Image: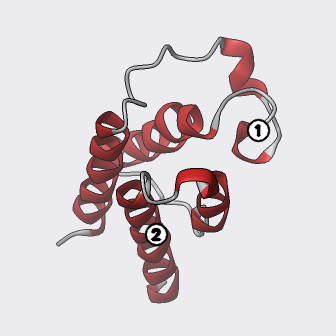
Amino acid sequence: MSSFKELETILSEMENELKNLGLWDVPEPATEAFKSESPFYLDTMSFNEWLHYVLIRRLRDVIAASGKLPGKVRIFPYAYEYYNEDRSRYMGLLRSIHRLDSFFERTAAAS
C-alpha cells in the first residue's frame, strides 16, 4: 500500500470514530481560531475541532497535492491525556491516533 493510501485509510478511520462519537458535525471554528500559535490550537479550539479542521484537513490537502508529508507527528500522548476522563469511550479514536503516530514514525525512519 502506498504511503498516501495508508495515510488516507488512517484519516478515514479517525473521521469515522469522530462521527461515531458525535464529534464530526460541529461548526467550523471562526477564521481567527486558525491563527493560533499554540500547540493543537489549545487557546482557540477544542482538540476534537483541531483533529477535524486542522490535522485531518491539512493531511488530506497534502495527499491531494501529492505533497511532502510532515517529518514527525506525535499527538497520541496529548490525546491520551485529553480523553483521560472517559478513555474507554474514546478507545477507537485513540487507536486511530496511535496508528497515525506509528505511520509517521515508520515513514520518518524510512527516509
Mark 2 → mark 1, Cα distance in angstroms:
20 Å
Q: In this image, 92 relative to 2: left or right?
A: right
Q: Earlier in the sequence, mark 2 or mark 1?
A: 1
The answer to whether 18 is drawn above or below residue 11 in the figure is above
Choose between 64 and 8: the one closer to the eye. 8
Task: Please give the residue where the numbered disc 1 appears in the rendered image.
Answer: 42
Task: Please give the residue where the numbered disc 2 appears in the rendered image.
Answer: 98
Q: Quadrant of the N terminus?
A: bottom left
Amino acid type assigned to the residue bearing label 2 in the image: His
Choose between 46 and 85: the one closer to the eye. 85
Residue name at image x 55 percent, y 31 percent = 49
Q: Residues within 10 Å of mark 1 (few under 14, many from 20)?
A: few
Residue name at image x 57 percent, y 65 percent = 76
Q: In this image, 110 relative to 40: left or right?
A: left
Q: Secondary structure at mark 2?
A: helix
Amino acid type assigned to the residue bearing label 1 in the image: Leu
